[in-house]
Amino acid sequence: MPRRAFRIGRSATGLGLFAVKPIKRRTSIVAYRGPLLTEEEADRYEARDSRYLFILNKKWTIDGSPRWNLGRYANHSCRPNAEPISRNGGIHIVALRRIEPGEEITYDYGKDYRAYFFKGRRHCLCQACRERVARRRRKMRAERKLAAERASRKKTSPGKAARNRTRTRTAARKNGRTKTARRR
């Protein structure tokens, strides 16, 4: 039996954490660790494009960039299965629900992250957003196909228009009117 409940593996968005055995709800999965930085130091790191900064409060930020910080591999999701919780001055990633083996461990990085990294896009690259975009594309494709079929039926089916013209002529003859009489 593996010692940890997760493994690091290839995900759609890079490296990620994946459960190797069932993880119960409210179980601490991994700690987000690293040196503590002051606000000024964190600003300098951010200017150098550091992506692993986790803000604890107004004064302190965790620099999660060291490779021994396994919490850095938990990816973002708009529909997460875990959440970060502050415990004893640190951050622990805790399961929101039961996580099955093979499922990626994700949490929501927050509005600031989405606003900064997904400026030009409507959605992020998480599994939930990719599924939503795929459903929307399938729906649009089906609607276009249906519209094309309707258009081709109208073009190839002269029957309805021809029947309408014939009915109009027949009704005009019955009423004693001719085509020329109707134009007046």
Image (spheres, rainbow, N blue to C red):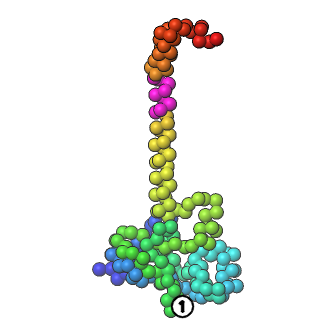
The location of residue 72, given as percent across then percent down, is 51, 77
Q: Quadrant of residue 46?
A: bottom right
Residue that carries the numbered disc 1 in the rendered image: 89
Q: Is residue 29 something that shows in the picture? A: no
Image quadrant assignment for residue 57: bottom right
Residue furthest out toward the front: 175
Span colored in magenta? 149-158
Secondary element under disc 1, as helix, strand or loop, is loop
- Looking at the image, the residue that sits furthest to the left is 1
Question: Can residue 104 be seen?
Answer: yes
Q: Which image quarter is the C terminus in?
A: top right
Q: Quadrant of residue 59?
A: bottom right
Vertical arrangement, residue 155 with respect to residue 35, above or below: above
Q: Main secondary structure of the magenta part?
A: helix
Residue at left offset 35%, top offset 83%: 3
Residue 20: x and y in percent read 35, 74
Q: Residue at x 67, y 85 (%)?
A: 39
Q: How many numbered tags mark residues here?
A: 1
Does the stretch in magenta take in 155?
Answer: yes
What amino acid is found at the position of numbered circle 1 in the picture?
Answer: Gly
116 with respect to 74 (left or right): right
> Residue 116: horizontal and vertical position, in percent?
64, 68
Asked if 112 appears above or below 44 in the picture, the reply is above
Residue located 66% across and 79% down the image: 45
Whether residue 121 is in magenta: the answer is: no
Q: Is residue 177 above or below residue 134?
A: above
- Seen from the viewer's position, the closer of residues 97 and 39 is 97
Quarter that holds the N terminus: bottom left
Residue 15 position in % (x across, y down): 48, 69
Local crowd at mark 1 within 10 Å, few (<14), some, or many (≥20)?
few
Looking at the image, which residue is at 34% across and 71% down?
101
